[in-house]
Amino acid sequence: MKKIYLFGKYHLGDKLNGTSLTIAEAILSPTRTYLPVLQKVKEKGIKIDGLIHCSGGGLTKSINFGNNIAYIKDNVNKIKVPPFFKEIQEIRNIDDYNMYQTFNMGIGMEAIVSSEKDANEIIKIANSFNIDAAIIGYTEGTNGGNVVKINNDDKLVYTK
């Protein structure tokens, strides 16, 4: 049967490379809810200083929170970028700068905590719900404005 493509190289029934999903299934797959993780974190008495849901602003969304803060996200590569994002980037020829600014690249939520001990406890809780989690960075003060730096790449610096 002949397929007709209106836009792009894929038909909705085509398989997404690197997955068992069709393009349609990948697009329609539900957003993960982090509420069960957050409930367990609260039950354990872990204090979260900041919580950022990374949809609608990608990994640069944090730039809008606080004053004179540098969000140094030097380990985002600890979370695997889902094949769907890689495919979007390749098909549309989007550079990393714009991908991280637009998409969460597999990091759906960021929690800011005061200690590595608390971070590791949250990771254990997330893993118990089959959610990959990792320490992806830290914050530090700046002398003016907010900044986000991703993967220690001078090309991935966002300022406000």
Image: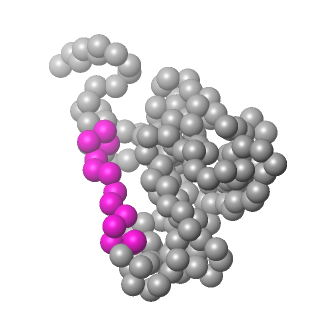
Q: Using the image as rendered, state which of residue 41 and residue 91 is in the foreground.
A: 41
* Residue 47 in picture, x, y percent from top left: 52, 77
Structure colour scheme? one colour
Taking the image as shown, residue 3 lies to the left or right of residue 33, namely left
* Residue 34 in picture, x, y percent from top left: 37, 64
- Most distant residue in the bottom direction: 44
Q: Going 75% across and 59% down the picture, which residue do you hit?
A: 140
Q: Using the image as rendered, state which of residue 92 and residue 9 is in the foreground.
A: 92
- Most distant residue in the left direction: 1
- Most distant residue in the right direction: 143
Task: Identify the image quadrant of residue 129.
Answer: bottom left
Q: Using the image as rendered, state which of residue 41 and residue 97 is in the foreground.
A: 41
- Looking at the image, is 29 positioned above or below residue 88? below
* Residue 97 in picture, x, y percent from top left: 64, 33
* Residue 90 in picture, x, y percent from top left: 52, 29
- Looking at the image, is 18 positioned above or below residue 40? above
Give the magenta part as a residue range: 26-38
Q: How many marks?
A: 0
Q: Going 56% across and 68% down the picture, which residue do you hit?
A: 49
Task: Identify the image quadrant of residue 55.
Answer: top left
Is residue 76 covered in magenta?
A: no
Q: Going 67% across and 51% down the picture, which residue do you hit?
A: 67
Is residue 33 covered in magenta?
A: yes
Residue 22 visible in the shown view: no
Q: Going 18% across and 19% down the picture, which residue do you hit?
A: 1
- Looking at the image, is 128 positioned above or below residue 132? below
- Looking at the image, is 55 positioned above or below residue 36? above
Residue 115 visible in the shown view: yes
Give the position of the C terminus as an image quadrant: top right
Taking the image as shown, residue 96 lies to the left or right of residue 22, namely right
